[in-house]
Amino acid sequence: MSDVTRLTAQLGAWRERHGSLAERLAAALAAVIERGGLDGRRLPAERRLAEALDVSRATVVHAYAELRERRLVASRERSGTVVRSVGRHGRAPGTQLPQLSRLLAPDAQRIDLAVAAPQLDDLVAGIRVELGHAAGLMQPHGYDPQGIGALREAIAQRLTHDGLAATADEVLITSGAHEALALIAALFVGRGQPVAVDAPTYPGALELFERAGGRPVTVAGDAAGMRPDALQALLARTVVALLYLMPGCHSPTGASIALGRRPALLRVAADHELLVVEDAALDKLRFDGPLPSLPSLVPERVLRVGSLDKLAWAGLRIGWICGPRAAIGRLTRLKAARDLGTGVLGQLAALHLLRDVDTLRRARVAQAQARMRHLHGELSRRLPDWRIAQPEGGWSLWAELPPRVGADGDALVAAAARHGVDVAAGRAHVAGGPRVDAVRIAYAAPESLLTLGAARLQAAWGELTT
């Protein structure tokens, strides 16, 4: 497949966008770049792309000019138009994660199997809170950078109940787990410093570490999780800012690090005085119940990130960091400088949810597991040559595509969009953004939409392989 043919396929139904032909083409090209689908490559010559798309050369010239104005591409003598360097971080400067791009420009005509988060439904829609409930819980002016004390206390009690002894002053409330990771990255990751991650991993974390100036580096793993010897080899040759793990319920695979593997990983980290960040945002969605947390093993070297968003509703935007008081104090000062504190209404709703979080967890886990089984069954029946392991929890399937068919995850994402369904490319989940023959498929939608989405994926795959 030539570069022009591949790019034409990635552009999808670009003519259906809004604006002039040049504006529509520029928007489609920008979307491909933001998905990491061009990876610093040279764009086709204007005349060649014009012929392939059956438009005038002037249309392509104007589209490329708009991309230059947005600093997505650069014109170089004797090299043509080149996507701006992705450098060592795997994404062009100023771009957004594909998931964020879809959130910024949603398409109501497509089935969304890319966002792995629960929808607003009867499990949480009945929550009612009033600002008057904050009386006596915080200062009258409403500013509390560390978060409402009652909420921090409730989270600390829940963590203690789960086996991690914690107090309210060891908890910082954040606007979701994403902000928690952003604060940690800003405070503990220096420019050019490696950050140890597994592969695949949560793309939001990769983006945040990169934006902080860090350099995510993949540490090899196996069926039991990240390998301690591989981590030791990395730490022996370079100074690493932190180790990022999702041991309890991984995104995007839904797997967990084997309990027997964890002490060895933590011993390696402790030997090098390495900060460990445990992302536990999905832990409560593990189908067979949550596993013990890392801080219960070495609390002085671990920051634990949690959230209600994956359990309740992503629009809640309530997360937290639990860790040593000194670290929480520094993170709180950074948050105060950024936004003065998380919104009070969301914190009050979280306080309400935590009063009966076990009931919510049972209902949400039952829902997620039923939808997982439904989508897994649909895909296994329609696309039997895909390798899709059943996850232990979470909201997504990691689908590995058959090798040597000439279609990678990026091509499937583009074809799926043309057929009216969104999925997430595997490339975004790996440090450096290499070609990955996999996609992440969320199962948060109702079963009727999952069935239709699976049928559209089958059609998209047929387009690429026949």
Image (spheres, helix red, strand yellow):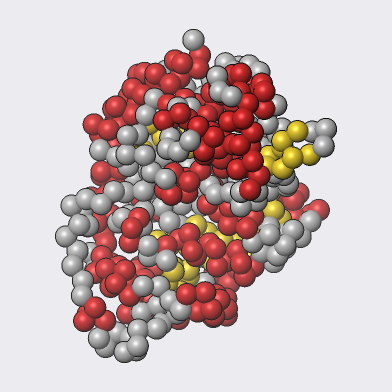
Q: Is 28 or 112 nearer to us in this picture?
A: 28
Q: Is residue 117 above or below residue 172?
A: above
Which residue does the image show at 45% across and 57% down from the upper left? 280
- Residue 243 vs residue 183, the one in the foreground: 183
Q: How many tags in the picture?
A: 0
Q: Quadrant of the N terminus?
A: top right
Residue drawn where x is 38% and y is 43% of the image: 106
- Where is 463 relative to 273, above or below? above
Give the percent coordinates (x, y) of residue 320. 44, 68
Q: Position of residue 300 (x, y in %)?
A: 58, 72
Residue 425 located left or right of residue 51: left
Residue located 63% across and 26% down the image: 57
| In this rendering, position of residue 464 left or right of residue 195 | left
Residue 453, placed above or below residue 368: above
Q: Residue at x 31, y 68 (%)?
A: 346
**Does residue 409 appear in this view?**
no
State the residue in front, 77 or 299: 77
> Is residue 121 visible from the viewing direction of this image?
yes
**Quarter of the image holding residue 60?**
top right
Residue 192: where, in percent of width, then height?
74, 58
In which quarter of the view is residue 72 placed? top right
Relative horizontal placement of residue 344, taking residue 264 as reference (left or right): left
Report the residue that reaches farthest toward the top. Answer: 466
In the rendered image, residue 432, in percent from the top left (x then y), is placed at 67, 43
* Quadrant of res 134: bottom left
